[in-house]
Image (cartoon, helix red, strand yellow):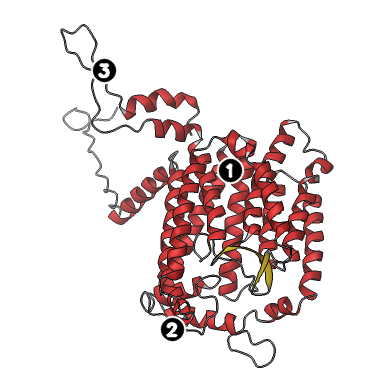
Amino acid sequence: MPGSRTGRPPVQRAVRRRPDPPRPPSDNAVRRLYTRVQRAWDRPLTAYYLILGGSLLITVLGLVMVYSASQIKALQMSLPGSYFFRKQLLAAAIGTGLLFAASRMPVKLHRALAYPILAGAVFLMALVQVPGIGVAVNGNQNWIALGGSFQIQPSELGKLALVLWGADLIARKQDKRLLTQWKHMLVPLVPVAFMLLGLIMLGGDMGTAIVMSAILFGLLWLAGAPTRLFVGVLSFAGVIGVFLIKSSENRMARLQCLGATEPQAGPVDCWQAVHGIYALASGGIFGSGLGASVEKWGQLPEAHTDFIFAVTGEELGLAGTLSVLALFAALGYAGIRVAGRTEDPFVRYAAGGVTTWITAQAVINIGAVLGLLPIAGVPLPLFSYGGSALLPTMFAIGLLIAFARDEPAARAALSARQPRFGRKRAGGAGSGREPRRWNTMRRRASAARSSGER
């Protein structure tokens, strides 16, 4: 072994390593923020909060916009400026009660209500066609007058009936393992749905029929219908839809207004579609201000119902419309999450049906306002004026809340909630009774973690 001149082994010098370049602090901050958001997103009560908070925010914002968009219409009719707002506020109050009741009902009671709601919806929808009882509004006879200025639209109740009854029917057939046969997949779901569609089309309401068809296809998709069976039903419905559109001059005129940017001369002037675009274009980023819309002064028909999204874009701008879209997206995601995480077939189908209903109707309404889809005459769920549409929709939201609360992990998290300062059982060291232990969230959560929390 070679050595140095002194006979000692050579001293190995430590090699200095260059320190790693410091990571930018923004990277760590973004990563921490992403981790926090992901943890919050995966919590058991995320869907519950999204459904409850999103639906209430949409309803409250809708009340504000109904008041703003309907003032001029009410004054033109020699009514108080808050006339439509007060009626919508009353409907929202009743709907809140229905939402709370539905959110507290057990799943068995929801299934028990399916057949009575379906029978009531069919009876009322047939009653619309009786002369002297049914009322025509904007060319569609799908209303029943209750006296005074109050009317109901039974076809809105038909959407809820199809969701509940269809979910219960498919769930019972799945329990008996009958969904592998195509006849059990289609019968009697498709015939009953077509019966409801026929009653709706007798009144000429094509928009509601499209939403009902979307609910039917959503239920078939969730039930696992084969692709060829699904495509066959979709093709049959498409052929009927094309025939109904070509047989009506009004519906053909609505198709011709797709993408129109200026009013046209002739029988098809596209006035409503064009002025809806004008309202959105004049809003800019942050809008002209709440109540400062110009189009609602008689230029834009149905400003507080079908085209309330256009008035929202004009007064609140792009920021307001994107906020509404974000709320509907959050509501749709939460509904899909509830349907995907449950093990109860009825809950899966009912949650999927409600989510399809609200999402499809919102897409049809907003697409018509943007000029991307024909004007179908359907309101924006929870947002547009109309108690007949608001009440069943809020009951359906209550269903989603009940299903979100019924998840095992969500039940454990909700049961762990206790007041910050609890009460101790009376008695001290000399009373012979043990003091009550503090019922903390950590103790309950650890005890419930074995019940399948995800």
Q: Which residue is mark 3?
A: 436
Q: Is residue 438 left or right of residue 223?
A: left
Task: Identify the image quadrant of residue 149.
Answer: bottom right
Mark closest to the chain's N terminus, 2 or 1: 2
Mark closest to the chain's N terminus, 2 or 3: 2
Disc 1 packing (10 Å; few <14; some 14–19; many ≥20): many
Residue depicted at x 52% and y 49%? 397
Q: Position of residue 296 (x, y in %)?
A: 47, 80
Residue toward you, 383 or 236: 383
**What amino acid is at disc 2?**
Val
Would you place residue 372 above or below residue 265 in this image?
Answer: above
Disc 3 packing (10 Å; few <14; some 14–19; many ≥20): few
Q: In the structure shown, which secondary structural element does the residue marked by tag 2 occupy?
A: loop
Would you place residue 146 above or below residue 406 in this image?
Answer: below
Q: Which residue is mark 2?
A: 294
Task: Identify the image quadrant of residue 144.
Answer: bottom right
Residue depicted at x 72% and y 61%? 200
Mark closest to the chain's N terminus, 1 or 3: 1
Cα distance, mark 1 to mark 3?
40 Å
Q: Is residue 358 visible?
A: yes
Q: Is residue 299 left or right of residue 8?
A: right
* Residue 339, numbered label: 1
Residue toward you, 246 or 41: 246
**What amino acid is at disc 1?**
Ala
Task: Identify the image quadrant of residue 65.
Answer: bottom left
Q: Position of residue 201 (x, y in %)?
A: 74, 64
Q: In the structure shown, which secondary structural element does the residue marked by tag 1 occupy?
A: helix
